[in-house]
Amino acid sequence: GNSVTQMEGPVTLSEEAFLTINCTYTATGYPSLFWYVQYPGEGLQLLLKATKADDKGSNKGFEATYRKETTSFHLEKGSVQVSDSAVYFCALVKYNFNKFYFGSGTKLNVKP
Amino acid sequence: KAGVTQTPRYLIKTRGQQVTLSCSPISGHRSVSWYQQTPGQGLQFLFEYFSETQRNKGNFPGRFSGRQFSNSRSEMNVSTLELGDSALYLCASSWTTNTGELFFGEGSRLTVL
């Protein structure tokens, strides 16, 4: 079946630290991969996506590369800010179905 | 441009009751999906509607149902509520079934006592 596994949180970092949130997936075929972010009291927002192997998605300083050989899509940011504090969800979808599979979410706390 | 609107935002029910949640998608979006978010299970897909037809369904009991109207607005209904139905119910819309991007509402938080 299809599933997404991401690292447990919370992750606590100081401002300007380097961020990595690990995400691995299991899927048949060729899924598209996503990172969504949920700020407190809000719904999920798309952060970035990659639709095929070796694609790199990037947005707001975050980036992730679709690695088919390791079935991974790790999220990275070189210098986090307090405003990045949120819950981050890794997800996959296979086209012809609008059914997303989400990871359990990783809470990021950034301290000034 | 207005985002996805969900009503009500918060509600409290007792076991055995039923509840109806509403979702208005972004104008022009024809696909509406529903997800249940709980601390233990995370985000789980309930169902997706496109042009008033249910296109996909998750692994939830028949107590969970939904529908979509001709203006793309959607409702979901949970009958015979159980304590375990307490969750944040998120609605998401997209242009079509295959866009790969969902636009989420802020959710309806249901508490079952």
Image (cartoon, coloured by chain):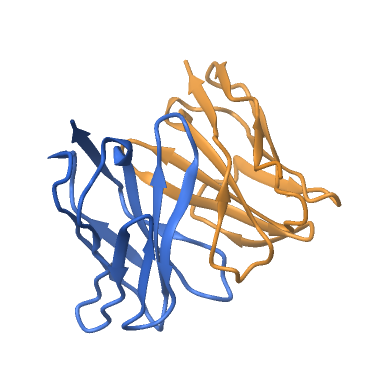
Chain colours: A blue, B orange
Total marks placed: 0
Where is residue B59 drawn, in percent x and y?
Answer: 48, 54
Residue at (52, 25) in percent of width and height: B110
- Point out the residue furthest to the right here: B70
Where is residue A8 drawn, in percent x and y?
Answer: 18, 47
Q: Is residue A1 visible?
A: no
Residue at (54, 62) in percent of width and height: B101
Residue at (48, 73) in percent of width and height: A94
Q: Quadrant of residue A55?
A: bottom left
Where is residue A44 drawn, in percent x and y?
Answer: 47, 45
Where is residue A70 drawn, in percent x and y?
Answer: 19, 78
Q: Nearer the viewer, residue B46 or B30?
A: B30
Side of A108 where A96 appears, left or right: right
Q: Is residue B67 visible?
A: yes
Q: Nearer the viewer, residue A64 or B82?
A: A64
**B108 versus B34 height, above or below:** above
Residue at (32, 57) in percent of width and height: A61
Quarter of the image for the N terminus of chain B: give it: top right
